[in-house]
Amino acid sequence: MADQSHLDQRYFVDQTIYNCPFCNRRHVSYSINAKIQFDWTDKKRCYAYFVRCHSCSNDSMHLAFDEIPTNHIGTISGGHRWRFAVDDDIDAGEFLDNAFFYSVPTSFFVLDERIPKVLRELLTEAEGSLKSNFLTGASACARKIVYELAILEKADGESYDERIKSLKGKHPEIEAEFFDTLLTIQQVTSSKVHENSYDGWSAKHLRIILAALSEVLHELYVVPALRDDRRKAIINLKTELVGTKKH
Ligand SMILES: [Zn+2]
C-alpha cells in the first residue's frame, strides 16, 4: 500500500503546534487559556482544556479522562496561558490526540460550506463517533457518505465498491489515490465480511477512510469554487483596467 501518512490528519502536532479547526491553517501555534475539571460520573473525573489558536484567536475544547500535566508559560493580554507538558521521548501530537476522547469542533478541519450539508453532517458525525470510539456508528456514517455522494453525483453501483469505482470514473480530475485508498481499505477488511463477523472498520482504517473522504469532498466541491473565484477576480481586475468590451 502506498504511503498514506499525508492523509493522517491530526488535531495536535505537538505541545506548541496544532491544526486549527477554525482558520483551516495547518501547523499554527496554540496555548491553553483555561482548564477545568468536573465529575463525569461519581467515580470518573473529566478534564477539559480550552485551547486558543494564536492565529485566529478562536477557542476549541478538548476532554480527557486522565489529567494531562501542563506548564504555566506566562500571560497574554492579562490572561494566563499554559502548555501541555509531555515527555520529550514520546510523540506529543499522538499522545494528545489519543488522550482526548472528545473535541469541539469535532472535525479536524471545519468543513467548507460549499460541501453539501448532508455530507458535512455525516462526516462530522463520523469523526465524532470515531473520537468517542463508536466504530460501528462511524463505519455506518462513512458508508452513508459514499451512498449520498453517489446520489448527488449521479454515480452508479449497488455496493460501496461499485459506487466508489463509478465516482472515480466520473471524476478523473480528482487524485485517483483517494478513491483507490477507499477501495483498498475495503478489500483488506472485506475478508471479515465473508465470515459474517463484520460490524465495521477498525479505528485505524476509519481514520484513513475519513481523511480520504474529506479530501474527495474538498476536491469535488471546494477546489472548483476557489478556481472560479480566482477566475472572476481576474476578470474583474481586467474589466477595471480595460473596461468592458463594447459590442
Ligand atoms: Zn485558528
Image (cartoon, rainbow, N blue to C red):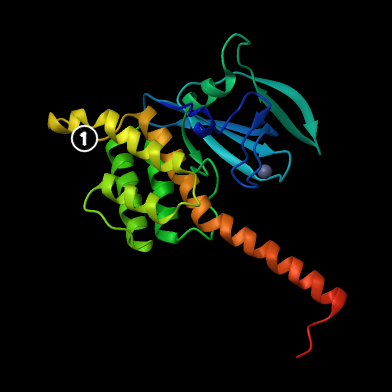
Q: Name the side, left or right, on which 223 lies relative to 201.
A: right
Kindly tell me whether residue 182 is visible in this rendering: yes
**Amino acid tagged 1:** Asp
Q: Nearer the viewer, residue 105 or 170?
A: 170
Seen as rendered, the residue at the extreme bottom is: 247
Q: Name the side, left or right, on which 142 lies relative to 23.
A: left
* Secondary structure of the residue carrying numbered label 1: loop
In what quadrant of the picture does the C terminus appear? bottom right
Q: Name the side, left or right, on which 174 lies relative to 245.
A: left
Residue at 49% over, 58% down: 115
Residue at 81% over, 71% down: 238
Tell me where residue 149 appears, x and y as whole percent: 37, 56
Seen as rendered, the residue at the extreme right is: 241
Q: Nearer the viewer, residue 51 or 227?
A: 227
Tell me where residue 164 appears, x and y as whole percent: 33, 48
Tell me where residue 122 appears, x and y as whole percent: 38, 51
Look at the numbered disc 1 and say if its residue's Cβ is closer than 8 Å to ligand 1.
Answer: no
Kindly tell me whether residue 131 is visible in this rendering: no
Vertical position of residue 169 compared to residue 80: above or below: below
Q: Which corner quadrant of the image does residue 52 belong to?
A: top right
Q: How many marks?
A: 1
Q: Nearer the viewer, residue 112 or 236?
A: 236
Residue at 42% over, 34% down: 208
Seen as rendered, the residue at the extreme front is: 247
Vertical position of residue 246 compared to residue 49: above or below: below
- The residue wearing badge 1 is 199
- At label 1, counting other C-alpha atoms closer than 10 Å, the crowd grade (few under 14, some 14-19, many 20 or more) is few
In what quadrant of the picture does the N terminus appear? top left
Q: Which corner quadrant of the image does residue 183 belong to?
A: top left
